[in-house]
Amino acid sequence: MKKRMIPALAATGLALLAGVSGAQAQEVKLGVVMSNTGTYAFVGTPVINAIRMAFDELQAANYFGATKVSLMVEDNRSNTQEAISLITRMATRDNAVMVIGPVATGEAMAAGPVANDLKLPLFTTATSPAVLKPGPWIFKVTETADQYMTLLGEHVAQKKPKSCFTITIRDNEGYIFQHNAFRDTIKKGGVGIAAEESILSADTDFTALGTKIAGSKADCLFLSTPPEQGANIILQARQAGMAANTLLVGNTGMGSANYIKAGGSAVNGTLFSAESVPTGVNDMAKKFIVNYNARYKVQPDSWAMVGYSMALIAANAIKSAGPNPTREKVREAMLATKNLPVVIGRGTWSITDPNTRIPSFGYAVMKVADGKFVEDK
C-alpha cells in the first residue's frame, strides 16, 4: 500500500507539487540562532548565508502557499548563555514554531533542555548524539560521529600508517566524541597511537606541541579542532620538523574554507569526513553551488550546503504541518521526514527511527588538493 509521500521538490528544487488549501493566511515565525561571530563562526556564517538564500528562494516560489512564514536570524556570538537567552526569547516572546541552531555540541546540550521544556522544536548542527537526550523536541541535521568518523577511520587505516598522533580540544564534547570514534576505529584497523593530546579551544601557541609531534616520528596526525586552530597546529608542527609526508587527517570542520585560508599549502592532502561533495551530489546541489557563488561571491563550503539543507528540511516540516502549523505539528512532521531531497550526503535526508531521531544521509571522505576539496575515492 503506497503511503502519501512528503511533497516532492519541483524542478526548481524548491516549489512543492502539492498546493495549499484556501486557508486563511497565518503568520509563522522560524528562528535561527547561530554563531555569526566568535569561535564557531566558521560554521554559523555559511549556514546563515545559505538559510537566507534558501528562504528567499522558497518565498519567491510561493512554497508556503497561504501560510506567511517570516525568518528571524540572531547571532549568539559563540556564547552558550546568549544562545539560551535568544532561544527562550524566540519561544516565549516571538512564538516561533521552530529554531534552527545553535552550532556547537556544548551550546546545544545546554540549550536543549530549555527548548524541550518550552516544547519548541530545536534543529542543531551539533555532532554528538548526546544533544538529543533532553527530549523529543530536539533534532540534529548531522549523523552521529560514530557513523562518519568510523567511515573516515576505516579509510585511513586502509592507507596503513604505522602510528597516528591525535589531538582534540577538551572543552567541547562534540570534538572529543569525534576524536574517540576515529581513534578507536584506526586502532581496530592496526594503526598504533603515538600519543593522545588535548588542548583548549582558545589556545594559540603550539610551539611545544609542534615539537612533540615532530619528535614522535608518527606518520599520521589527526586533529579534532576548529579549522583555524588545526591549521595553526600543522604550521607549527612543520616548523618544528614534522615529516613532509605525514598523513594529515581532520574532523568535519576541516571542510571549512577557513582551514585552507589559514593553512595554505601546509594543509594540502588533509583527509576529513564531509557532509557534502563540493561538485554537487545532484542537480539541486549543482544549482545551489552556482547560485550561492553568484550571491556571495565565494564557493560554498560543506557548512553552506548543510545550512541550505537545514532550511529545506525545516521548511518541509512547516509545510507538511498543514495550514495552521503548531510546534507539535512541526515536530511530528520532522519525525516523519523520509527521503527528502537535499544538497548534502548522497542527496536525501531521512529520520529512519523516530525514537532515536538520528538522521541518515551519507557522508563522503574528502581531501584538500591544491587549495580545493575533492572526494578521496
Image (tube, grey):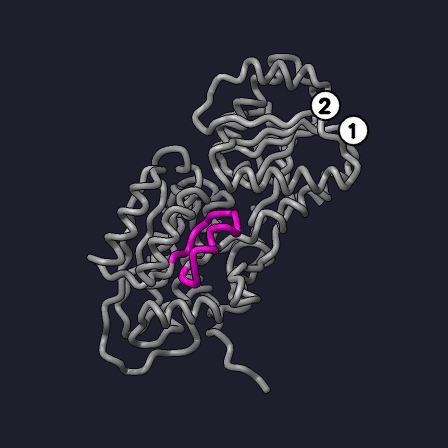
Give whichever of 196, 303 is nearer the camera.
Answer: 196
Q: Of the two numbered discs 2 and 1 on the same chain, state the one appearing first in sequence.
A: 1
Task: Answer with the quarter of the image where residue 230 lies.
Answer: top right
Element at label 1: loop
Is 89 on the left-hand or right-hand side of 350?
left
Give whichever of 209, 55 is nearer the camera.
Answer: 209
Where is residue 187 drawn, in percent x and y?
A: 74, 37
Is 374 on the left-hand or right-hand side of 34?
right
Where is residue 56 drawn, in percent x and y?
A: 33, 57
Please indicate, yes or no, whether residue 294 appears anywhere in the rendered image: no
Is 368 on the left-hand or right-hand side of 330?
right
Locate the C terminus and report the quarter of the image it occupies. top right
**Which contiguous range is marked in magenta?**
122-137
Is 327 on the left-hand or right-hand side of 103?
left
Q: Residue at x 52, y 52 (%)?
A: 129
Q: Residue at x 53, y 18 (%)?
A: 206
Marks 2 and 1 in Cβ contact (< 8 Å):
yes
What residue is disc 2 on? 218
Rendered position, 175 above or below 11: above
Element at label 2: loop
- The kind of residue on which mark 1 rests is Lys
Please indicate, yes or no, whether residue 153 appears anywhere in the rendered image: yes
- The kind of residue on which mark 2 rests is Ala
Locate the N terminus and report the quarter of the image it occupies. bottom right
Give whichever of 30, 312 is nearer the camera.
Answer: 30
Instruction: Find residue 162 and name its label.
Output: 1
Q: Residue at x 49, y 43 (%)?
A: 301
Give whichever of 293, 204 is nearer the camera.
Answer: 204
Where is residue 165 drawn, in percent x and y?
A: 67, 26
Q: Which residue is drawn at 40% across and 33% down?
A: 39
